[in-house]
Amino acid sequence: MTSKNVLLICTAGMSSSFLVSKMQETVKMRGLDMKISAVSASEAERKLNTIPVDYLLLSPQVRYLKPSFEKSLENNQPVIYVIDQTDYAMMNTGKIVDDLV
């Protein structure tokens, strides 16, 4: 199994870094090979040009960006997934990881 790169796009914040930490714990507990990182929406394009991304997660606050990411990434498109608002708020990383695998 090859490692999967997951990039979480958010508005800026603290909650996304906490979510990434919890997701990393979930992935480790399940024995999955995923590298997870987060960037703000303003940093996303730069980051997407510097690392390979298999899964692009959008926090509920930036779900409106999905069409622009689909268009800009159409030649090398990762799976783009908008995290459910309740799962994001409850830090339900088990469900979020389940939705990816």
Image (spheres, helix red, strand yellow):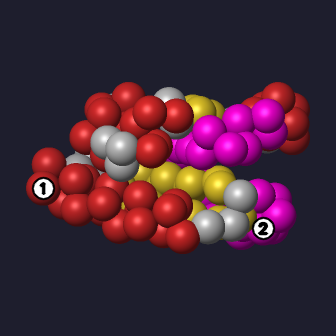
Rendered location of residue 35, percent (x, y): 40, 62
Residue drawn at x 61%, y 67% is: 13
Q: Secondary structure at mark 1?
A: helix
Is residue 53 covered in magenta? Answer: yes
Q: Residue at x 86, y 36 (%)?
A: 68
- The answer to which quarter of the image holds residue 75 is top right
Tag 1: Cα neighbours inside 10 Å, few (<14), some, or many (≥20)? Answer: few
Q: Amino acid at mark 2?
A: Glu
Tell me the CA gap for discs 1 and 2: 29 Å
Q: Position of residue 26 (x, y in %)?
A: 22, 53
- How would you rate the neighbour count of disc 2 (Cα within 10 Å): few for under 14, some for 14-19, many for 20 or more? some
Which quadrant holds residue 78? top right
Query: Which of the marked residues, 1 or 2, is nearer the chain's N terminus?
Result: 1
Segment tinted magenta in the rendering: 41-65
Check residue 29 in the rendering and tell me which mark sits there, or answer none: 1
Q: Residue at x 35, y 67 (%)?
A: 21
Residue 49 makes an appearance in the image = no
Looking at the image, residue 42 sits to the left or right of residue 8; the answer is right
Task: Identify the mark at residue 59; answer none if there is no mark.
Answer: none
43 left or right of 79 in image: right
Give x and y (percent) for residue 100.
40, 34
- List the residue tagged with mark 2: 43
Q: Which residue is located at x 48 percent, y 68 percent? A: 17
Label 1 sits on what residue type? Met
Residue 88 vs residue 11: left or right?
left
* Residue 58 drawn in magenta: yes
> Residue 74: x and y, percent?
80, 32
Say if residue 17 shows up in the picture: yes
> In the rendered image of this protein, does residue 15 appear above or below residue 85?
below
Q: Between residues 100 and 21, which one lies in front from this camera angle?
A: 21
